[in-house]
Amino acid sequence: MKVIQTQGVHHITLMGADRQTSIDFWEGVLGMPFVFEQPNLDDESTNHLYFDPGDGRLITIFTREDLPVDPTPNPNGVGNLHHLAFAVSRATYTQASARLHEGGFANSGEVDRGFMDSLYFRDPLGQLMEIACYKFDPPEGRTHSDVLAKAHIIRVEAGAKNITDEHLADAITVLVQERGVG
């Protein structure tokens, strides 16, 4: 079989509860503009809300007014969604924990992931969410994935457990040299 080449995430759809809970969370807490709504064309008893997560793509939520808000964490099993991660700026990341607490959302506080910093919390329906901020900017013309792929090779060659700042810095150097700059 030939591959079906993807070009990015088109949208992600989650099951919500009532309409206002979704708007309050996605727009009110995460700052994602509410774009539009329409009936779910596969089940018109369900509403379909569309939000812009910041990159022009979509996060969509199915809602029904008779669905209860249930903050029980989603099951952590094979085939289930574990969490959704959203990119934020360093400035936003440094404010996220306090702002979530102000909004009544408990969170993990800052977590160092080697190549990025993370913060975890649950939405009103129990879904685990992550706010993530890369520790580096890729060189011009390259992507975060380019840097991480090169940093992984450097990390493995060094016998290190995970990608660190040193691997990132060396990866960026290699990518810039490959481009013929510096």
Image (cartoon, rainbow, N blue to C red):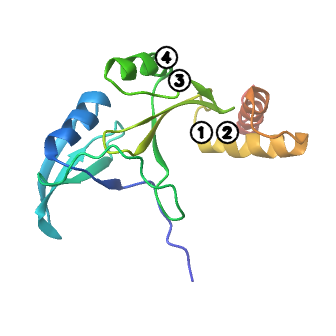
Which residue in the structure is indicated by mark 4?
A: 94
Q: Quadrant of residue 124?
A: top left
Q: Residue at x 58, y 32 (%)?
A: 140
Which residue in the structure is indicated by mark 2?
A: 147
Q: Quadrant of residue 54?
A: top left
Q: Mark 4 or 2 closer to N-term?
A: 4
In the rendering, at what x and y percent does residue 30 appear? 32, 31
Q: Of the residues shown, which amino acid type is indicated by label 3?
A: Gly
In the rendering, at what x and y percent does residue 137 appear? 59, 28
Measure the alpha-carbon separation of dots 4 and 1: 20 Å
Viewer-nearest of discs 4 and 2: 4
Label 2 Cα neighbours within 10 Å, binned few <14 / some 14-19 / many ≥20: many
Q: Nearer the viewer, residue 172 or 84?
A: 84
Q: Of the residues shown, which amino acid type is indicated by label 2?
A: Val
Q: Of the residues shown, which amino acid type is indicated by label 1?
A: His
Q: Mark 3 or 1 closer to N-term?
A: 3
Viewer-nearest of discs 4 and 3: 3
Left/right placement of residue 173 relative to residue 90 reads: right
Disc 2 element:
helix
Q: Mark 4 or 3 closer to N-term?
A: 4
Measure the alpha-carbon separation of dots 2 and 3: 26 Å
Measure the alpha-carbon separation of dots 2 and 1: 5 Å
Q: From what the image shows, is residue 32 above or below residue 1?
A: above
Viewer-nearest of discs 4 and 1: 4
On residue 109, which mark appears?
3
Viewer-nearest of discs 2 and 3: 3
Which residue in the structure is indicated by mark 1?
A: 144
Measure the alpha-carbon separation of dots 4 and 3: 10 Å
In the rendering, at what x and y percent does residue 138 appear? 61, 32
Q: Of the residues shown, which amino acid type is indicated by label 4?
A: Thr
